[in-house]
Image (spheres, coloured by chain):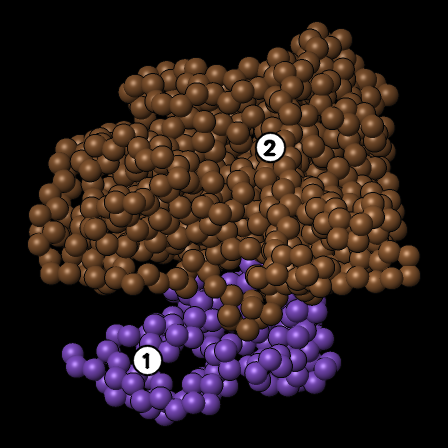
Chain colours: A purple, B brown
């Protein structure tokens, strides 16, 4: 099968790519755009480490075909900070110690961003429900939930 | 250390934090070497079989395939076996396969797709042998043998009161025995003796970063970029297996995306090196999570405890028989067996203690290191039985514990070090936080509510452990800490740099944790046993003190005075009212590129034959756990409504990270208690894929979940001790005890599934 030409923006920058029809977004981000903040854990859409935002909706990049991205806007973890200035959610993660090994952190931060975009003032039950799309094997989640609450309070949405 | 405590109360921002929240942190997973090939592994579909032949000619002929490796290549190596103490695991299967998932052949190709395709072209002929799926089957007379001949290696050293035996009988890999006093005689004289049997489950580490290694082999040496937790252990294994001097083997470490023991010691790394040698090019092997589930597990176990008690509730003696399911290969089973057997007494005072622990070979996934190993198995059985005895005697379980708990300064066992935490006071605090003494009205039927407590305990810092460290202070006062503790999420980077910064009077952000490379980094025994802060941290404190002494002597020589006339502050020495910037003193004296002060430090926990397991524990790791549960008596579902755990960090060098360590470990143990398990259907794994292997999610959290840290002092730098494994201990027992409190039925096998809960309720009638 021949390659498919797509146009998309990634972190606000336009790209024109030619992708094989079986190629997934995670591989394109990591291997062609060198955005290695997109981590692949389970590679089966279970762990959420590869979560990125497509038109502000969280998707698992490990199971999203690259050709589906034609005309879409992708946000990865690399697109959140502005220069040296961290996004408020990133600051909250730092302040609340909401990471350990850090492998799930990019996906977690982006899931919190998607959550706060829809629910700027979520209660704890809603945060638990949204973050259940992302596995963290290190923290026990509680400190991530506190960071999400702090980010909401700081108006991160 | 006087005056050392106050600065640490202030929270710090983790040094590795900015890189981790922005996606810039580099893991081995992210590394690429020019020209590297990609490898995949063909695994055995059979639990036990002899390899009759392997035909890889079609795979080798596939365009894009560069090398295929099988046991025929491994057998030519100087020493193709690895394992901790006992070495029975081949680099790749040589004559037999011993579990579903055993590595049979591996292909290096230009990309992963080609390597995968090549695997399907390899033809393996097997002669099937009967599997050995349970501990009981493995120990039965006439059971099929996993190994026909004795394997390599030697049993681990233990103290005079213990025995340590390699392969004492068929299918037993290792036996540990410990005896203090005459347990049988004391039990015979006790008012009550209770014998109970506990069954512990098998779980996987489920670290999110896969096992990933890149190897490169040239005439000059072997280079490996590895996610391994133990770079120096790995270096020595690679050197031995390939017959190279250790200075021709170089291991690079990066951030590790979770390990929990799953990335400890040697595993698939020598296979990657073998592929790189045969291919003549760098090779990357990244396992899938399905493969990780077939690489290592926690030890499943059967524990039989016979415990004596006087009529008034004083514990007398405990006799234990412990059988650990080691799976197909040794891995870290020897140390796990020692630790389970030795820790089985828990935090209590005994007249006599006797235990026999066996690592039993089965055709299951090999078992090895898992956060708190031995302590988790022992604390589930021990702390469950303590509660059962209290309830049988009609004594409140907290009062029963209080009466028998070791006090501070009492040795764990004769010849070992003293308990260094105040056990009763934190038990009371945890009991208060779960509402143990203020019980609300019962929930509506069919639900029942109950409260349970447990104290897990393990030794910390590692038996006979050793660590070196180097602290390099540059002309400008900026410093680099060099040590081999891998940043695996435990927060070592921040804690270890903070120890150096405080010792040198420098701002924390002036200190950097050096990249680990066995060619330059000072050695340690690996990232294990909650030893980073206490053991390697102490070596770093000593290295920083050494650098500081050199700095003061240098400045004193420049200022023509004695070092003790000077005060070091923010890279300035003050003498009386005069301030002298050190960088200026260095510039004036050295010129050129300036200089560096190289401070060296080391720690060695001495061996002592009088200590039961060969060295006294450097410190003790208790975990106090309290659980409030609601049990639905119609469905058997257990909901943990409050879960509170406390651990003792000594001085918290990094308070935020300490709390995170406790909560993270507690949630792992919580998942194992309620639902998480690597299940088998006969000899075949039933859920060895992330789609069906269930780990705790945020939605699984107890309604109230809280970890907290107490500071009772420790032998490490600034009074610190280790805390990383604590939260694994005692959680399962606390939940079982709460279930018993709620419904009067006892669960002795984890996980506490609704089926088991209902069966236990029905069994008590």
Image quadrant containing the C terminus of chain B = top right
At a point 69% along the width and 43% down the height, the residue shown is B546
Res B129 → quadrant: top left
How many residues crowd mark 1 within 10 Å: few (<14), some (14–19), many (20+)?
many
State the residue position of label 1. Answer: A66
Q: Nearer the viewer, mark 1 or mark 2?
A: 2
Could you say where residue B618 lies in the image, as x and y percent from the top left? 69, 32
CA separation in Å, label 1 and label 2? 50 Å
Residue at 27% from the left image edge and 30% from the top image edge: B78
From the viewer's side, name the closer residue of B69 and B477. Answer: B477
Is label 1 in a helix, a strand or a loop?
helix
Q: Residue at x 55, y 39 (%)?
A: B524
In the picture shown, does residue B701 fall above or below B219? below
Crowding at mark 2 (Cα within 10 Å: few <14, some 14-19, many 20+): many
User: From what the image shows, is residue A92 above or below residue B707?
Assistant: below
Residue B531, position as x, y percentages in the image = 63, 41
């Amino acid at each position: 099968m021949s390659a498919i030409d797509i146009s998309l923006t990634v972190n606000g920058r336009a790209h024109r790519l030619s992708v094989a029809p079986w190629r997934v977004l995670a591989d394109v981000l990591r291997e062609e755009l060198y955005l290695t903040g997109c981590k692949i854990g389970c590679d089966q859409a279970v762990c959420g480490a590869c979560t990125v935002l497509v038109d502000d909706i969280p998707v698992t990049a490990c199971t999203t075909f690259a050709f589906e991205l034609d005309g879409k806007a992708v946000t990865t973890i690399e697109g959140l900070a502005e220069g040296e200035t961290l996004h408020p959610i990133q600051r909250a993660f730092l302040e609340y110690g909401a990471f350990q090994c850090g492998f799930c952190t990019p996906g977690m931060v982006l899931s919190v961003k998607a959550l706060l975009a829809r629910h700027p003032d979520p209660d704890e039950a809603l945060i638990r429900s949204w973050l259940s799309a992302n596995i963290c094997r290190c923290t026990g989640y509680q400190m991530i939930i506190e960071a999400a609450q702090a980010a909401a309070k700081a108006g991160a949405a | 250390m006087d005056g050392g405590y106050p600065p640490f109360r202030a929270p710090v921002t983790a040094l590795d934090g900015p890189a981790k929240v922005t996606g810039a942190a580099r893991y081995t997973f992210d590394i690429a070497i020019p020209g590297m090939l990609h490898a995949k592994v063909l695994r055995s579909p059979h639990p036990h079989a002899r390899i009759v032949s392997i035909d890889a000619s079609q795979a080798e002929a596939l365009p894009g395939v560069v090398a295929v490796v099988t046991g025929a290549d491994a057998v030519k190596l100087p020493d193709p076996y690895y394992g901790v103490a006992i070495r029975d695991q081949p680099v790749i299967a040589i004559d037999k396969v011993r579990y579903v998932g055993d590595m049979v052949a591996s292909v290096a190709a230009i990309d992963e797709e080609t390597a995968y395709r090549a695997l399907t072209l390899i033809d393996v002929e097997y002669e099937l042998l009967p599997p050995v799926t349970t501990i009981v089957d493995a120990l039965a007379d006439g059971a099929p043998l996993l190994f026909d001949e004795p394997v390599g290696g030697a049993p681990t050293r233990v103290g005079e009161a213990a025995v340590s035996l390699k392969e004492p009988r068929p299918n037993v890999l290792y036996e540990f025995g410990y005896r203090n006093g005459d347990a049988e005689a004391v039990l015979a004289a006790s008012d009550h003796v209770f014998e109970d049997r506990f069954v512990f489950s098998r779980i996987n580490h489920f670290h999110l970063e896969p096992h990933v290694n890149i190897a490169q082999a040239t005439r000059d040496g072997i280079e490996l970029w590895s996610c391994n937790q133990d770079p120096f252990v790995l270096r020595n294994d690679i050197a031995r297996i390939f017959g190279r001097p250790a200075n021709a083997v170089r291991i690079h470490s990066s951030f590790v995306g979770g390990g929990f023991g799953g990335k400890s010691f040697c595993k698939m790394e020598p296979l990657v090196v073998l592929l790189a040698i045969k291919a003549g090019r760098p090779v990357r092997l990244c396992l899938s999570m399905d493969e990780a589930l077939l690489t290592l597990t926690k030890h499943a176990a059967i524990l039989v405890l016979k415990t004596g008690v006087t009529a008034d509730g004083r514990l007398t003696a405990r006799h234990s028989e412990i059988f650990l399911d080691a799976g197909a290969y040794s891995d870290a089973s020897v140390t796990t067996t020692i630790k389970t057997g030795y820790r089985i007494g828990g935090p209590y005072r005994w007249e006599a203690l006797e235990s026999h622990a066996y690592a039993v070979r089965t055709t299951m996934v090999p078992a090895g290191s898992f956060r708190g190993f031995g302590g988790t198995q022992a604390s589930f059985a021990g702390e469950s039985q303590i509660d059962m005895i209290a309830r049988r005697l009609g004594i409140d379980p907290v009062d029963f514990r209080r009466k028998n708990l070791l006090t501070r300064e009492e040795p764990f066992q004769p010849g070992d070090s003293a308990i260094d935490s105040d056990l009763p006071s934190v038990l009371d605090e945890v009991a208060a936080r779960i509402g143990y003494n203020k019980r609300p009205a019962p929930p509506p039927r069919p639900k029942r509510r109950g409260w349970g407590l447990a104290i897990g305990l393990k030794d910390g810092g590692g038996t006979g452990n050793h660590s070196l460290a180097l602290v390099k202070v540059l002309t400008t006062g900026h410093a680099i800490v060099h040590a081999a503790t891998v940043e695996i999420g435990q927060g070592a980077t921040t804690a270890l740099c903070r120890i150096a910064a405080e010792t040198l009077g420098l701002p924390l952000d002036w200190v950097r944790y050096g990249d680990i490379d066995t060619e330059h980094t000072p050695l340690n025994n690996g990232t294990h046993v909650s030893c980073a802060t206490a053991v390697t941290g102490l070596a770093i404190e000593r290295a920083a003190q050494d650098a500081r002494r050199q700095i003061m002597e240098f400045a004193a020589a420049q200022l023509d005075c004695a070092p003790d006339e000077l005060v070091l502050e923010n890279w300035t020495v003050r003498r009386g009212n005069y301030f002298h910037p050190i960088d200026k003193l260095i510039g004036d004296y050295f010129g050129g590129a300036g200089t560096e002060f190289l401070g060296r430090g080391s720690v060695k926990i001495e061996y002592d034959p009088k200590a039961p397991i060969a060295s006294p524990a450097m410190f003790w790791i208790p975990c106090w756990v309290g659980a409030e549960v609601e049990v639905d008596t119609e469905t058997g579902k257990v909901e943990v409504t409050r879960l509170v755990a406390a651990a003792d960090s000594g001085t918290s060098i990094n308070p935020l990270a300490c709390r995170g360590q406790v909560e993270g470990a507690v949630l792992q143990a919580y998942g194992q208690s309620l639902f998480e398990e690597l299940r088998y259907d006969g000899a075949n794994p039933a859920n060895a894929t992330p789609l069906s292997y269930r780990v705790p999610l945020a939605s699984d959290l107890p309604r109230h979940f809280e970890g907290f840290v107490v500071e009772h002092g420790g032998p490490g730098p600034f009074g610190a001790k280790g805390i990383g494994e604590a939260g694994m201990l005692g959680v399962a027992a606390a939940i079982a005890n709460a279930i018993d409190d709620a419904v009067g039925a006892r669960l002795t096998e984890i996980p506490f599934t609704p089926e088991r809960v209902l069966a236990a309720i029905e069994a008590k009638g």
